[in-house]
Image (cartoon, rainbow, N blue to C red):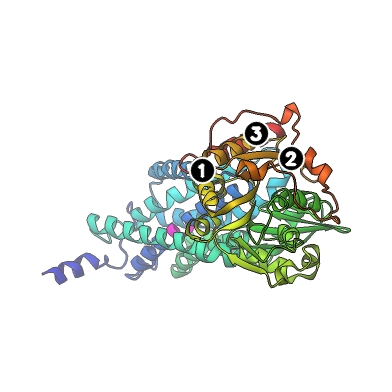
């Protein structure tokens, strides 16, 4: 009985049955139903990828991943609702309209990544373009499923129709959620990935218009589908050139190297002898003046510990803080933990970059670990005499957790008695409240602090915190090399003097469950740029 019921439910209508709304399609055959159901899977996969693509690019360019993904997803779902509502006005020619929608969404969605990257450096306010594109794609995606349901009407009973469509739709969503982080971002890239997904979208239109090639009413759609296919194919081939062009607009200096890792976009620029590293568009160092930053980051902590045998560096995959640590003959072991192997590999193998860090990764005292610092610190049982925290600014919540009280409690546990930590804490001038919040969070984790700052021409006034036992962080320097390019014992003493415009009261602490620092940091930088 059950087998008979399944067989009856799965049996499509006879050839020539309507495509919904009483439409008839020339060349309609029973296997067209399967093609249409597979189309549900493809359009669901592509639609979600376009949404993830917009959210990821917004995070790369604007920061604050929670805000960007929340607003992009909300806008996208709202637009889908409008598209679904608008589908009621399509009274006939549902298949024809479906093909048109597929052609449009393949072109717009497939090229969306390239458009967002190319337009970002050219406009003062990027958000109208971002959300306008999300609204348009969401509207078109919202039209797809209602049109398909109308086309499939009469081929299945109502219950089986809804069940089949939703099943393929949800499976497509799962496919997108796996393909995007595991394949598209790490191995294909955002721009090329958009074009390839657009090709999958246009394949649906091509299958339909050529499967029904005897239908003269689809002639224009057939031509449009072929043209869009060629455009997307060309975009996929030349995606690296498009990426390079967009980055050339974004950066002041020529881009000499750029690659997308599973975690970030890595770009190197060069003008004369000045190499600069950018991660997701944010400057990390300039070879011209990075020594000021790294000498100030390392030596106020390293120089205050009597026997700094074991040193831990969190972040700093460029090896520049490691270079400073290795100058101390008392260091017997240096452990560097950086999330992205693409960074540590680049700075250990590229001759021009290894020259800047003085081949620090080749030193036998060094152990390099590619791991998430948050989980690594939580699980690490051993202790260190010095901890150097050289992490990117808290522009999003995945980084913001590394500035949380929970994380700093882990740092306190890792510090050996008498040990000292040095924490990169952002601009004490541009983001004084954020700087103060980092210090307050360290203290809330049981780590007394001593704030200091240094002027780095590429960054401006930059702030740090020493953290550890008061006797350790307030003692005079025990050792500092004579051959540093910037820092001296007398100069180091002046780093702890703050002008009034760099002093602020912290508006709280950064907890793992509120990520207040990410919002505050974004707000202060935005206010500074206005």
- Tell me: 301 left or right of 403: right
Residue 461 x %, y %: 76, 39
Name, please, the residue furthest toward the top.
Answer: 500
Where 8 falls versus 417 (above or below)?
Answer: below
Main SS of residues in magenta? helix
Residue under pointer 2: 453
The image shows residue 417 at horizontal and vertical percentages of 57, 52
Quarter assignment of residue 31: bottom left
Residue visible at 86% across and 53% down?
A: 485
| Residue segment shown in magenta | 43-47
Identify residue for label 3: 524
How far apart are the two marked residues, 1 and 3, measured between alpha carbons? Answer: 21 Å
Can I make out residue 453 in this image? Answer: yes
Return the residue found at the far right: 272
Q: Residues within 10 Å of mark 1 (few under 14, many from 20)?
A: many
Question: x, y (%) of residue 441?
Answer: 55, 39
N-terminal label among 3 and 2: 2
Q: Secondary structure at mark 3?
A: helix
Within 10 Å of the Cα at label 2, are there few (<14), some (14-19), or many (20+) other Cα atoms? many
Closer to viewer: mark 3 or mark 2: 2
Residues at badges 2 and 1 in contact (C-beta under 8 Å)? no
Whether residue 466 appears in this view of the structure is no
| Residue ID for mark 1 | 405
245 vs 271, left or right, is left
Q: Residue at x 73, y 63 (%)?
A: 326
Snapshot quadrant of residue 191: bottom right
Quadrant occupied by the C terminus: top right
């Amino acid at each position: 009985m059950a087998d008979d019921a399944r067989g009856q439910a799965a049996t499509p209508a006879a050839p020539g049955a309507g495509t919904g709304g009483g439409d008839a399609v020339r060349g309609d055959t029973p296997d067209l139903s399967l093609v249409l159901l597979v189309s549900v899977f493809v359009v669901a996969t592509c639609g979600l990828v376009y949404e993830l693509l917009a959210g990821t690019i917004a995070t790369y360019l604007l920061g604050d991943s929670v805000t960007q993904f929340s607003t992009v997803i909300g806008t996208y779902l709202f637009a889908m609702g409008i598209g679904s509502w608008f589908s009621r006005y399509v009274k006939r020619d549902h298949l024809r309209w479906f093909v048109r929608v597929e052609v449009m969404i393949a072109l717009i969605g497939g090229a969306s990544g390239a458009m967002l990257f190319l337009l970002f450096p050219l406009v003062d306010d990027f958000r109208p373009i971002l959300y306008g594109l999300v609204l348009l794609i969401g509207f078109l995606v919202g039209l797809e499923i209602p049109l398909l349901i109308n086309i499939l009407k009469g081929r299945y009973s109502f219950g089986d129709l809804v069940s089949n469509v939703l099943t393929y739709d949800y499976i497509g969503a799962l496919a997108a959620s796996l393909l995007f982080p595991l394949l598209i971002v790490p191995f294909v890239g955002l721009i090329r990935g958009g074009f390839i997904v657009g090709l999958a979208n246009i394949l649906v239109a091509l299958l339909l218009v050529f499967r029904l090639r005897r239908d003269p009413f689809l002639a224009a759609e057939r031509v449009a589908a072929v043209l869009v296919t060629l455009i997307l194919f060309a975009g996929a081939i030349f995606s690296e050139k498009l990426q390079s062009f967009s980055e050339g607009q974004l950066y002041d200096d020529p881009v000499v190297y750029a690659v997308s890792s599973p975690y970030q976009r890595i770009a190197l620029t060069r003008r004369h002898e000045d190499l600069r590293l950018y991660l997701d568009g944010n400057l990390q160092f300039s070879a011209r003046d990075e020594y000021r930053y790294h000498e100030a980051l390392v030596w106020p902590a390293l120089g205050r510990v009597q026997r700094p045998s074991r040193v831990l560096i969190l972040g700093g995959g460029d090896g520049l803080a490691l270079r400073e640590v290795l100058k101390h003959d008392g260091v017997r072991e240096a452990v560097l933990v950086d999330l992205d192997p693409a960074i540590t590999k680049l700075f250990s193998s590229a001759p021009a970059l290894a020259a800047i860090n003085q081949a620090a990764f080749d030193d036998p005292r060094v152990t390099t670990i590619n791991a998430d610092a948050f989980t690594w610190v939580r699980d690490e049982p051993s202790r260190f005499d010095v901890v150097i925290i050289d992490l990117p600014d808290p522009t999003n919540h995945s980084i913001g957790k590394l500035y949380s009280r929970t994380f700093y409690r882990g740092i306190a546990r890792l510090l050996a008695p008498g040990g000292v930590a040095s924490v990169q804490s952002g601009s004490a001038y541009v983001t004084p409240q954020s700087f103060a919040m980092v210090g307050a969070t360290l203290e809330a984790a049981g780590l007394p602090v001593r704030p200091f700052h240094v002027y780095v021409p590429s960054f401006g006034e930059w702030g740090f915190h020493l953290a550890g036992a008061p006797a350790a962080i307030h003692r005079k320097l025990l050792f500092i090399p004579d051959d540093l390019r910037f820092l001296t014992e007398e100069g180091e003493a002046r780093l702890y003097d703050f002008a009034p415009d760099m002093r602020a009261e912290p508006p709280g602490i950064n907890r793992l469950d509120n990520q207040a620092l990410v919002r505050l940091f974004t707000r202060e930088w935005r206010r500074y740029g206005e």
